[in-house]
Image: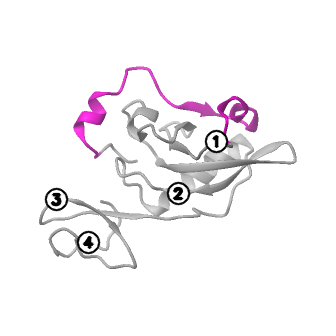
Amino acid sequence: MYVYAGPPELLAQVRPGVMGAPIGSSADIDGLTPDDEPFTYVVDLEGTLRIAPRRSEHVACAGGRPVLAAGEIAFERVHGEWCVTEISNQSTGYCPDPASWREVAEALDRAGIARPDGFTATFVFRHCPGCGELNVVKDEDYVCVFCGCGLSGLSGP
């Protein structure tokens, strides 16, 4: 489970009861114009995939609640059904670990939506113990780009 760790002002903008659209089947994607752009997604604590326009915040898609996974997702229609073409765990508000793929895969499988075998782009997030800044770890270089402090190689921000 991931709790929101992003800017408090974004959490303050969340409207109670407003969340991303629940996706329980390929048909749920039909009215969302998926060819226009990738979407922001979360997997809520009940295991439901929820999506919102890419420019929306993950915390808004989740209604301010903790999530099992978060990132960006793109769909393409194949033989009349929507399938996932791109998916990541890119969410600096929740900083989901690459292991969150399991929850994403289960949500997509329950919805009957074809998917890849894993994230098509995977991100590793760490907060610096020295300066507190959020880092995206690249090339397994666990060093803060802001202050040079060593970052934990362990899971979690």
Q: Earlier in the sequence, mark 4 or mark 3?
A: 3
Question: What number is the disc on residue 132?
Answer: 3
Q: Indicate yes or no whether the magenta region holds residue 20.
A: yes
Of labels 4 and 3, the one closer to you: 3
- Quarter of the image with the C terminus is bottom left
Q: Which residue is drawn at 74% across and 52% down?
A: 114
Which stretch did the figure color magenta?
A: 5-34
- Secondary structure of the residue carrying numbered label 3: loop
The residues bearing labels 1 and 4 have C-alpha atoms spaced at a distance of: 38 Å
Q: Distance between the residues labelled 4 and 3?
A: 13 Å
User: Within the magenta stretch, is there residue 106?
Assistant: no
- Amino acid type at image mark 3: Gly
Name the mark nearer the viewer: 1 or 2. 1
Marks 3,1: beta carbons within 8 A? no
- Report which residue position mark 4 lands on: 152
In the image, 66 versus 33, the foreground residue is 33
Percent from the top left, x then y, of residue 7? 25, 42
Question: Where is 67 relative to 16, above or below?
Answer: below
Tag 1 residue: 36
Mark number for residue 88? Answer: 2
Q: Is the residue marked by circle 1 packed among few (<14), some (14-19), or many (20+) residues within 10 Å?
A: few
The answer for how far apart the CA atoms under marks 3 and 1 are is: 36 Å
Type of the residue with mark 4: Ser
Name the quadrant containing residue 27.
Answer: top right
**Label 4: which secondary element:** loop
Q: Residue at x 47, y 38 (%)?
A: 45
Whole-number angstrom distance, CA of label 2 to CA of label 3 = 24 Å
Mark 3 and mark 2 in contact (Cβ < 8 Å)? no
